[in-house]
Amino acid sequence: MENILFKKKRLKFTVLVIAAMTAIILLRLTLDQWQGYSKGMDSLQKDDNRAAIMYFDRTLNAHIPFSPIEKWAKDELINLAHKYETSKDYEQALLCYETVRTSRYLTRHFWIPDGDELPFLNDKIAGIKANLLVRDGIVKDYREGYDQQMAIMNKDYSPSVFWSLIVVFSFWIYISSVVVWIFRRKKVYIIISPVAFATWLFALYMA
Amino acid sequence: MLIYRQLLIFLLSFAGFVFFLTPNINTGDGGELVTTSHYLGVAHPSGYPLYLLIAKMFIFLPFGNMAFKVTLMSAMASALILTLMYLLVERLTSCKWSALFTVTLLFQAYAFFTQSVIAKFYPLNLLLILLISIIWILHLNYFSEDSKTIRENSESSNRNVYLSAFILGIALANHHTALLIAGPLALVVCIEELTFYRRHFGAGGKCQIADEEKTENIILRRRLSGYARIIGASLLLLLSGFLINAYLLIRGGKNVFFNPSPIKDLDTLYAVLTRQAYGESGSITAASNAISGLDVYLDSLKHFISAMAMNFSIFSFVPFVIGCLYLFRKNLASFLFTFISLLLYGPFIISLTLGSSDISEIMYYMVLNQYFLPALVFFTLFAGIGFYQIRLWLERFNLPFLAKTLAVMLAFFPLVFLVQRAVDSNYRTNHVPYQYTKDTYTILPVNSMLITFGDNANYQGWYLKSAGRYREDICQITSAKQDTSLWTFQGCPKTVYGNIFSMLYSSKDFKRLIPIMLKDRFYGTQYIKQGSIYAAYMTSFPFSIAHMYLPKNLPIANTDLFNELTKSSLDNRQLKADKLINNSVCLSHMTDDLFTRQLCTGYLIHLANIASHFSNANDHKIGEIMELVIMDAQTGEPSVKMKIPVTENNIPYLELANQISEFNKWKIFYLRKKD
C-alpha cells in the first residue's frame, strides 16, 4: 500500500514538473508570437511590408497549436501575397507564400500544422515560379514550369513518422532496461534489453 | 526539502535558459544537427548518433519550430547539470548556500550559458560526464566511509562501475571527449580497491571483520574471482552503450534523403568515428600528439586560467584554491578524481586543440567556448566547497550572523553577471542566421544554383532548404572551401533535381555549368578567391548578399557588350533585392556570436552596392568619398574594396552600413576584456 502511494506521489510529481516545463515553453512562445505579430502589424501600418513579412514569419515559427495569433499572422501573409500577385509583383508574392509554407514544414511534429493548406500553397508557388521562368526564358511554356515545380514540391522525403516513433521509444526502452538491470538485476530486464535493441535497429532501417 | 529545492533550481534555470533560447537556427553546427536529426541521417564526424536520436524525440514536441525544439534539449541538459551540481555540493557540504553559490556561479558562466541556449551537443556531453563524476564523488565521500559491511561496500562499488561503464559507452556515442573521464575513473577504481584492502586487512594483512566473513582467504578469493566478473560485465555494459553507434552503420548506409556523412562500409564507419576527415584534429591524430613540450602546456595553462577568470571573475580563484585544499585534506581520492578531471578537460584539451600561444579569434571562440565545458563544472565544484570552508572559518570566529549573511549574499551574487549575459548571450534576439540565409535564397531567380561555402552557410542552408523546404527550386551545392573542388549535393539530391540540373550530376566539369551561368543562375555565398580552384574557371560579381558567378573566358563574341549588359541587369536586380532583404536584424541582436557578426558583413556589401548605384552626378554629390574595405573573416585579407562618392541619395544607405558595421564590431566576450 505504501509502495503504491509512493508511486502515485512520484507520478504526480513527474506530471507537475512536465506541466511546469510546458508552461514555461508556452509562455516564451506566446511572448514571441505576440511580439512578432504586434511588430508586424505596426510595420504594415507604416507600409513597411518587408519588415511585416519578417515579423509574421517569426510569429509562425513560434508555433503553438490552435493559436489565434498564429492564424492572424498567416492570414496577413496570405493577404499580402494576394495583393502582390494582383499587382504582378511576383517576387514579393513568392516570398509571402514560401514564408507560410516553410514555417509549416519547420514546425512539423507528428504531422505538419495546417497541412491541408499545403496543396493551395504549392499551387500558388508553382504558378508564380512558372510565370517567372517563362518571363526569363528558362522554360518555353507555363505548364512545363508549373509541372516541374509541382513535381519537386509534392514529394516529401522525410522518414516515416511511425517508424521514427518506434526508433525513439525502443531506444529509451533499451537504455532504461539496462539501467534498471544494473540496479535490480532481474532476468526480465536481460530479456527486454536485446529485444528493445533489435526493435530499435529494425525501426532505424525501416524509418 | 532537498527535492523541492532541487526542483526549484531545475525549473528556475530551465526558465532562464528558455527565455534566452535561440528563436530559430543558430550559427555553427545547429542547422546540420537539426536537419540531420529530422531525416535521421548521419551528422559530420563523429556522427553524434545519441544527440540525433534525442533531438528526434524533441522534434516530436507539438510546439515551436524544429531548431527551437532541438535547442530545448540544451536548455534541459544544462538545467539538469545545475540541479545535479546543487545536489552534489549540498551532499558534500550539508550547506544549501554553498550549493546555491556553485549553481549561480556556473549558471552565469559565459561559455556554459551560451552553449545552453543554442543547438549543440556539448551540454549533453557535459551531463553524461557529470553523471559519472557524481556517482564516484558521492561514493568516495560517503559510501566508503559510512558502509558497515564489506558486501554493502562491494555492491555499491560494483554497481557504480557498471553504471559508469554504461554511461561512458553512451557518452561515446555523443562526443569523443567523454573518453577523457575514463582516466580519473580508472584511477578511483584502483584507489577504491587499495582502500578496501587496507581497511579490511589493515597494515599487517589481518582481516578486520571476522564476524562477517570467516577468513581473510575467503574474502580475498571472492574479491579476486569477482574482478573477472566485474571487468567482463563492465566491458559488456560499455559495449552496450557504445552500440548506439550502430545507428551510423544503418542510417549512414541507407539511401537516406539527407545524409552529410554517408557510411558505405566498416572503413568509412571507422573514419567517421575517429573523425579522420579533420586530419590533424582527428581523434586518433590528436591523441597521438597528446604529449607536447612544456611550453605548450604552460601556454595551455595560461589560456585556461585566463578563460576561467573570464567565465567566473578572478575572485572565484579564492574559493577555488580553498576548495582544492579542503577536498585534498578531507578525501584524497575524491580530490584526485575531480582535480585530474579538471586538468584533462582544461589545460590538456587546450593543449590538444590550441597548442600555441598565438591564437586567432575564431580559435578562441571555437575552442574555449565549447570543448572544455566540463572543466567549468569541476572548477565550480571546488569553488562551492571552498565557499563552504570560508563559511566554516567565519563561524569559528564566533561570527555566525556575519557568516550567514555573507553566505546568502555571496550565493546570489554571481547572478549579477546575468545582466552581462542579457547583452552578450541573448540568443532570443538573434534572428540573423535564419534571416540572412532566408534572404540569400529569396533574392535568387527561380531555378538557380547556389554554392554555399563553409559550415555556417552550408548548415543554415540545409536547415532552411532541406528541413524547411524553402525555395525548393534552388539547388544548393555545398562545398567546404574554395581550395578544393569537392562538393556535395546535400541540398540538391539527384532524385529531386535530376531533371532540372542534369548537367550537374554527370561530372564535376565546370564547363558543363557555363550555360546555366550565362542565364544568370549560378551563385555562391563567397566571392571567388584568387588562387582557388574555382578561380581558374569562374569570376564573381557581388549581387546583394550573394555573389553571381560567370565563366572566366566567355564563349561569346562580344564580351564587352555582355559585361555591360550584365552589369546593368545586376544593378537593377540589386535594387529589387533591396526590397526583399531585412538587414535590420543586424542592428537588434544582443549576442557577441562571432559568426553572426561575420554574416552581417554580407549586408554591408549589399548596402555598399546600393550606395554606389546612387552615386552618380544626378544624385547630388556632396564632394566626399567613402572608402569601404570588408575583411575576409578567415584570411584577414580585404575581400571587398570600394570607393563610393557620397551623394544625397546614398547617405541613408551609407549611414545604415556604418551603423551595422559599428554594432557588429563588438569583440567576443573573452577578448573584449583583453582590449
Image (cartoon, rainbow, N blue to C red):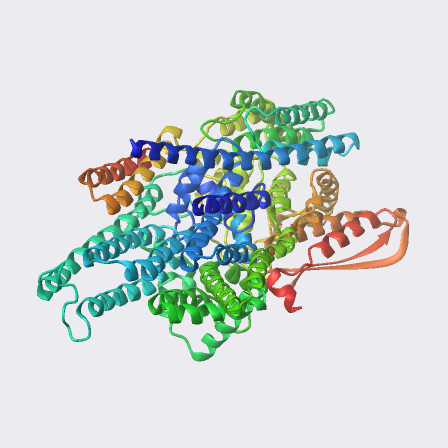
B152 relative position to B574: left or right: left
Residue A204 occupies which quadrant of the picture? Answer: top left
Q: Residue B287, relative to residue B26: is it above or below?
A: below
Number of labels in the image equals 0
Horizontal relation, residue B248 to residue B567: left or right: left
Q: Position of residue B214 (x, y in %)?
A: 9, 61
Near-viewer residue (A101 or B339): B339
Q: Quadrant of the C terminus of chain B?
A: bottom right
Image quadrant in which the N terminus of chain B is located: top left
Residue B575 at x, y percent in the picture = 75, 41
Residue B76, given in percent of the width and then of the height, sits at: 47, 44
Q: Is residue B258 visible?
A: no
Question: In the orientation shown, which residue stands out farthest toward the bottom?
Answer: B294
Q: Quadrant of residue B278?
A: bottom left
Q: Position of residue B158 (x, y in %)?
A: 23, 55
Residue drawn at (56%, 29%) of the image: A64
Res. B211 visible in picture:
yes
Which residue sits at x=50%, y=51%? B479
Q: Is residue B70 left or right of residue B335?
A: right
Viewer-nearest residue: B504 or A77: A77
What residue is at 37 percent from the left and 58 percent from the top? B133
> Who is closer to the viewer here, B591 or B440?
B591
Identify whether A163 is placed above or below B354. above
